[in-house]
Structures are given as C-alpha cells and as structure tokens.
Image (cartoon, coloured by chain):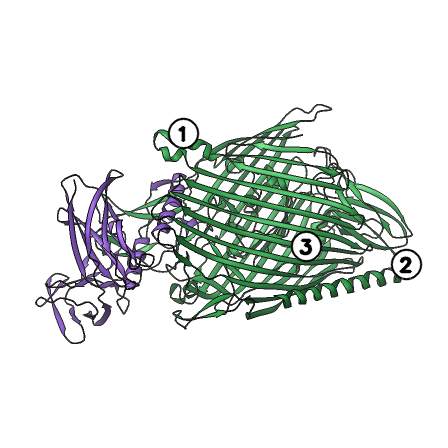
Amino acid sequence: MQKIIYRWTLVLLMMVGTTRLMAAEITPADDNKFTVSGYIKDKNTGETLIGANVYVKELQTGAAANLYGFYSLSLPKGTYTLVYSYIGYEQLVNEVALSENKTINIELSPTQNNIKEVVIVSKKENENIANTEMSVIKLDNKTISKIPVLMGESDLIKSIQLLPGVQSSCEGSSGYNVRGGSADQNLILLDEATVYNASHLMGFFSVFNSDAIKDVKLYKGDIPPSFGGRLSSLLDVRMKDGNNKKYTASGGIGLIASRLTIEGPIVKEKSSFMLSGRRTYFDLFLPLFKKKDSAMSESRLYFYDLNLKVNYDLNKNNRIFVSGYFGRDMFRYTDEFNFLWGNNTETIRWNHLFGTKMFSNLTMLYSEYNYELGSNSGTPKFKWESDMKDVSLKYDFNYYLNTNNTLKYGAAGTIHYFNPGVFSIKESKDEYKLPKTNALEYALYMSNEQKLGALLTIDYGLRYSIFQNMGKATLNRYDNNHNYKDSVVYAKGKIFNTYSGFEPRVSGSYLLSEVSSIKGSYSRTRQYVQLASNSTGGSPLDVWFPSSPNVKPQISDQFNLGYFRNFNKNAYETSIEAYYKKMKNQVDFKDYANLLLNDKMDGDLRFGTAWSYGTEIMIRKNSGKLTGWVSYTLSRAEKKINGINDNKKYLANYDHTHNVSIVLTYELSKRIDVSANWVYITGSPTTLPTGRFYYGNTIIPVYSDKNAARMPDYHRLDLSITLKGKEKPGQKFYGEWNLSVFNVYNRKNAYSIFFEQDKNNPQQMQAYKMSMFPIVPSITYNFHF
Amino acid sequence: MKNIKFIMLVITILFLAASCKKKIDLNLNNEEFSRLVVEGTITDEDKQQIIRLTKTSDYSNPQAPIPATGAIVSVTDGANTYSFTESASGVYKSNGNFKGEVGKTYNLSVYFDNKEYTASSMMQPAFTLDSLYALPEYDGYSIYINAQESPISKQYYLIKTIKNGILNDTLKNWSFFSDDLINGLYLQDFNVAWLEASPGDTIQLETFSISKEQYEYISTALQTQSTPIPFLGSNPANIKGNISNGAMGFFQVSAVSMKGCIIQ
C-alpha cells in the first residue's frame, strides 16, 4: 500500500514539476505572443459557464471555456474584437489592445426573452460544426426542467433517454443503454465522483435533483482520454457552484416530492455555497391504508437527496471546491422488514493557474454505494449488507500552448473496495459472507487538440490504464467447465493480478463550409468493473465486481462518422452519425444464474463478444419560441456468448431497431410554455416458449432461441404546460405552476409478457401482458426568490 | 435463502401495485419438435416403482401430455437391474416391488425412438418429521413442523402437501429448501407450507430427500412460472434436468417420509 502511495506521489510530483517548467519557460520565450485568459461567468449568479465561447473576429479563431469556465488564448500583439457567447446568454463584445498578458473575466447575462433574437450573429455560434466533438450532447438545467415527466419530477436521466443513440433499459428505469452497450458500461460522474447506482425507488426516479445541477454532458462514443473505466459512455454531471452575488432560494412542491435549494455568497464574489435537498412523501399516504392493514401505516417508503457545494476563490490563481452528495432510499414494512440503499459521493477540487496558459485541477474523490436489508422482528431476524467504495486522486492539466494547440494531460488513481455481501442471522449467529476484495485502477493520459489550417481540427490522445487486484482477497478458481476447483487467499496489500493497456482516442473535424462539417472518431475503451445483474433495468441489490484472473477486462473499439449541418443562421443544428462498436470479453450470466449472495458467482459467468451498429439523426433547435429536438436512431445490438443460446448469436435485451423521440417546447406567451414529447421504440427482444411439458401438474415451457421474439412496439406521448406568475418590476418572488400528463393517450405498453394456466382449463396457457404506467397527471409548483 | 424470496416477493408486489395485467392474444411460433420428457421417482418404499414418459408438445395447444409409448426402461444400482414394463400408455412400472436404499446411486436407462437416454441420481437420507400442526393464517392454514435436520451438510428437501388424501402436485404449492443456513439444527415451529383448508381436514406432509441438482431443477422450474419483471431480471431459458441426450424432465431418487395432522 505504502509503495503505491509513494509511486503515485512521485508521478504527481513529476507532473507538477514539468508543468512548472513549461509554464515558466515557454511563456516568456514566446515574445511576440500574449495571452488573454480568464473565467466566463453568469452575471446574475457568478456560476462559471462550462463550454462558453470566445471568438476572435480578426483571426477567425477562438476557444471554449473548460469545465471550470476558464479560457486562454495566445495571440500576437494587436487589437482584437473578442466575442463572448453562450447558448441562452447575450453576447458580449470586447475590444482588447493586447500588448501584455491580460486577464479578462467576463460575465454574460442570460437572454431575457427569446422573442428578440440577438442581432449580431457571430461565427462562433456554429461551435457544434467547428469543434471535433461528436457523439456528444449537452443538456442544461433549463432544458431538462421543461421536459414533461412522470409525476412532474424533472429528471436528468429520463431526459437523457430521449436522446438519439440512448435507449431506456426498461420502462420506468433509470438504466440506459448507449449505442448497444449494457447499462453498466456507462460512467456516471457527479462532480467527477462515480455514481454507482443512479436510481431511486426502483428506478422510477434518478438520483439527480435537477435543481442542484448546472450542466450535463453525455459522451456516446468519443470519450476524452482523461476519462475511462467504462466502455460505452460518459455522463458528466456538474453541480451548481452556488450564487456568489446574492442569496437565492428555489424549490418546488410536487405530488410526490418537494425540493428546496438555497444558495448564496459566503464572502461576496469570492466564495459561495449551494445546498439542495429533495424528499418524496409517498409514504405519507400510507396511513390511508389503515383500515385495511394497520401495518401499512407503520411502513415507510421514501427517498431523499442532499447536494452540497462550497467554493472559495483564494486568489486569482487558486480556487477550491468542496462538494458532496448523499442520497438514501428507505423501504420499511413495520419492524419485519427494512431495506435501504443509497449513494454517497464527495469531491474536493483545487483549481490552480500556473501563469496564464496552464490550468490545473487536483481532485480528491470518495464515492460509495451500499445497501442494507434486515428484519428486526421476523423469523428469522436477519441482516444483509453490501457496499462498495472508491477513493481516488486525479490531477489534470490544460495547457493552452497557442491558438492551434491545446494540450490536456494528467493522471488518476483509484482504490476500489468491494464488499459484495454479508448475510447474518441473529438466532443462529450464522454469518454467510462473500469474500471482500480490493483493486487499484490508475491511468495516465494526454491529448492535444490541434488546428491544422482553418478547416481541419484533430484531437488525438492516449490513455494508459492499469488495473490490479489486491489482497486481502479470496480468489476462487474454476476449471474449464466453470466448476469450482479451489480457492487461494491473498494477504493484505498483495497484488495478485495486473491488467493494463493503451486506449487511443482520435477525433477530427473538417469544415466543408461555415455551416457544415464532417467528423470522424475512433476510440478504444477498457472496463475493469462490471455489474452483476441479469435484469434489464438494474436493481438496488446488484453488486459490482472487478476484473480478476477469472474475468478479463472488457475492451471496446468504436468507430464513428458524422455529418453536421446548421440551417437558418445556426438556429437549427442537424447531424447524422453512424457508429460501429465491437466489444471483447463481454460478461453474461448462465441461464438461471444466481447473482444474489453467491460466493461462487464467477462460475456462473459466461464470456463472449458483443457488437452494435447504427445511425442517429438529430435535428435540434436551441433558440426562438420553439425549442427542442427530433431524433431518430436505427440500430442493432447483438451478442455471442459461449454457453448461452447454444453459442449462437442473439439480440441484446436492449436492441431496439427504431427509436424516435420528439421533444418540443413552445413559448405561447411570456407566461405560458407548453411542452410535449413523444417516443416510439421497437419492442424489446424477448424469449417466448414454443413447447411445453408437465412437471407434476404444472406446465413447464420449452424455449427455442434466446430473444427471438419481440414485445409489442412502445409509444407514448407526454404533455406539460408551465404557467408563470405575472412579473412586476421590483418583484422578488417568482412562482410557476407546472401541469403535466404522462402517457396522454393511455397506451398500455407491454412491460412484460407472461403466461398462466387457465383456471377453468388447466391445459390452456393464457397469455397476459403487464403494463406499468397508465395516464398519470401531476401538478408541481416551482418557485425562486 | 427464504428471505431473499420474501424480499423478491415484496419488490414484486411493489411493482405489481403500479402495474396492470391484461389478457392478450399472442401468436406463438409453434415450431416445437417433440422431445422426450422423463418424470419418475425411485423411493425407499417397497413398491412397484413408476417412471412416466411423455413428449413435449406445442405450447399454445391445450392438450394433455402426449405419452411416449414403446420405450425400453430399466434402472440399475450397479448390482441389480430392474426392468420396467409399460402398464398404461407412457406409464412404466417395475416388474415387481423393490425399494431404493440411502447412499446408493441409481442409473436410469431409456431406449426410445432409436435413441438412448440416461440419468443417474443418489438417494439421500430421509427428512423425518417429529410432529406438525396447522395455524390459521391469511384465510388459510400455515403448516409448522418440528424436526431434526441431519448433521450432514448439503442436504436438500422437497415437501408436498396431501389434503384428505389428495396430493397437491402443483409446483407453486411445493415447498423445497436446502440446509445451507439450518444445517444440523432442530427445526422448531418451522413454517413449511400454507394451504386452503377447513377444520376437520386431514393434512399430510410427504417429505422427499432430493439431490442438489434436483433442488436447482425445481427452483428453476418455479422461476419459469413467475411473472417476469424486467427490472428484476428475467431471461427465460430451458430448465436443465439430469437426463442426457437433450431430453427434458428429471429422474428423482428420494427417501420419503409421511406425517399428518387434523386441522382443529
């Protein structure tokens, strides 16, 4: 252990050392060039604007602010017109006479109303065309909050599921599948800390309280080299920093949950905090069941979330952020049964500027997922616990070498602690324990975004990741037929297995015109932890397990090609992307595998390959009275696993040939917004019986091929209307009503299909479908002051 | 492990509370080729032992099991071979009485349609009940037992209920468990079954010692009967018995024991 810490300290010191050297040497050596750098922020709240643009009119070049709102441009001596812009904000034009390095911090004002279009349209509005990023979609709080959802709780993950290339794992679930990858191949980060289970209440809600969230970016293929550990996607969620100018509060009261967020300065313009909480009160209705069942009134069923963030500007070169998330789901049936689970993440970050060209961020992370079930009065009294913890350190550097090159590099290390489960019975003092295990995962990465002339930009990078299994651990060994052979126990701190490999990531864009471009990318990703789940949606009881001598790391190679075109002065962004993804060492579970408290689970694993391909079309409109998007995905996802389906290929559970989403918001007047979304998805593959035989007098089904049949197609329309209060000058309190209707035409979408023996004729099998949500209206009142 | 089932049940109920169930007409691709199905139990009772042979049929076709006739059936324990004769269509009875012995392995051989099918299973010690009683619960009766579980680990049991002499042979009403968490314990007031009954009914429990393979066979067979909830995972697949050559079913070898009580 000490050795590892030592090694890592050394790597980090070396990085800081070279960085200092680079910062010190290169900057003054470049006589003719000066740097203009600073932060781009929101004028009202002081929130940094991630990805805001700076455009140099004279040179027709520009830059985007990084994840902390920092930008840096190196330009020859001269006078320039800098145009600062960000979607949903007024542009700001700044004349700068550059004869020395300058720090210019910019504050942009949110667009007051969308009716008056901004007159000056800078070229930078075609950012989506010019940058190398593809297969990336950004959503902000405002967009998410307008999408109508179940029970009126605006939900980030439910919004993500409406994007092209993203499939909802199953109805009502917070699991999602990106471009034919399984649900555990998505890296979900909240302020850089991994969220291992993003569901609340069986997945009907996600752990993200949208009031606490500033910005969300989903990478579907072209994951930056600074991130890794999952094959298919990265969902990068950033919490609000907190208003550093004045105290504000916002919140909402809904049918099922209430929210409250408070933010404000601790030291004005220097330090701020944000505190956000949410709790459902579904269980408050339980006493209504009293007549029927007194136990119900003693039962609990709720979840809550707490987000907290504090930041402090130490000086112009140093800024510190501390953020945390804590969420819990609680299900309790009197004293007989209780079940709670939740995530906990903590992030400490230190932004430091080495001069004007070098931005660094040091992050310390802690993330935990655990669950606990138990019974205090039942027979037998029992307790079942499981948890996993990560402790990580990450050091990132952005080096703005010149206008044509931006270097990003860094290192990251994580210690994973897995405790897959302990089951204890009070009466017999028996304990059934799955062996704990630990692992180390680290990575070094570097990338450069390079402009080659005015038309071509390429972003090339390399990530080298290492994964090590570490004692104290018990490794079960199996023979070639997956039968348990023997066990080896490794001492604490002993590294007994190492995997490592390069992960190249390349992307490029070529401008065909001012409003169109083609982009391509290739990326290799490696994944060392996976979820033991044979469900489609993911349940709270699922545990993560690491790669080991029994489980090889998953590897994916993905190729993407896209054409991007903007219309009508960049008001409409359209894109068409095609992808092909090949995944090795895919893990699946044998038929009727037992994944709960199974200490020989590795023996139930089966391995093989998976591949997917598809085309995604998206038309998006970000400004004007009508905003939203229309997307269509045509895709296929298949697997071939040794030992499943007689070793023949089969469709993945999340293969949906067609997927259409239409998400639109229309501003009827200053006070009324209406939103609608409609989805159409090809039915999920399923396995239906072909034959039967009797066991006792029960009919047992006989199946042919796995996933050879399909459920009926899924479609649904949701609507919502937002009514804002009248705005008066000098008003402090703003309120709005949101009425939404989920599944407007009450479609009974099949959640599952099953058969039962007919009561009158036991030889007859009757088919049934189960559907989840009928039409669900809801009302929410939101406010801020 | 019973608790896990309970938890699953609770979660299932939660789900069902939010869902609705509707009859549908479904066109199944009925391309089932006929496979042999074996069902038979060799017990430690001195009797004519019975093996039933049927064939699989189309899932949606409401019909009684199709008997597999004209098979040659025999069971051997290594020393003795017992031949079976078809007494009724698809029902094969041993030629004379014999009883299985605990610790012995029995091998089944079936020659049918030019193919040979085999299976083998070892008889485990019986699970003998000291007493049982019924208590009214949830509009029916829960059956509780008192019994010593054998100190030998990795024992598996199957319990079927018989009400007024009628065997309840529906899978969902069987009770089966392993001694994983109760090995060697005296099972006092141990709940094993629930059934609908009225005072005066005679309830008997028939216990079978079964192999690990059969325990797994029954539990997967039961899983095919549950309502699939994608959220909890449902990847339907054929259940694997112990018969070779692609035949379905299970060749069971059990020490049996029977005990009864009358509902007060």
Where is residue A665 shown, x and y percent of the image? 60, 36
**Could you tell me which secondary element the residue under label 3 belongs to?**
strand
Q: Which residue is mark 3?
A: A363
Where is residue A276 shown, x and y percent of the image? 61, 39
- Of residue A547 and residue A106, the one placed in the foreground of this image is A547
Same chain for the residues under marks 3 and 2 in the image: yes
Where is residue B256 shown, x and y percent of the image? 18, 59
Depth check, mark 3 against mark 2: the one in front is: 3
**Could you tell me which secondary element the residue under label 1 belongs to?**
helix
Q: Is residue B124 visible?
A: yes
Query: Mark 3 or mark 2: which comes first in sequence?
Result: 2
Where is residue B120 shown, x and y percent of the image? 24, 69
Same chain for the residues under marks 1 and 2 in the image: yes
Disc 1/disc 2 C-alpha distance (Å): 77 Å
Query: Mark 3 or mark 1: which comes first in sequence?
Result: 1
**Neighbour class for label 3 at 10 Å: few (<14), some, many (≥20)?**
many
Q: Which residue is mark 1?
A: A288
Report the quarter where the C terminus of chain A lies: top right
Q: Is residue A207 visible?
A: no
Residue type beneath disc 1: Leu
- Of residue A676 and residue B104, the one placed in the foreground of this image is B104
Query: Mark 1 or mark 2: which comes first in sequence?
Result: 2
In the rendered view, would you say B64 is above or below A641? above
Q: Colour of chain B?
A: purple
Q: How many marks?
A: 3
Q: Chain of mark 3?
A: A
A598 to the left or right of A506:
left
Label disc, if present, on residue A32 of the rendered structure: 2
- Of residue B61 and residue A137, the one placed in the foreground of this image is A137
Residue type beneath disc 2: Asn
Residue type beneath disc 3: Thr
Disc 3/disc 1 C-alpha distance (Å): 48 Å
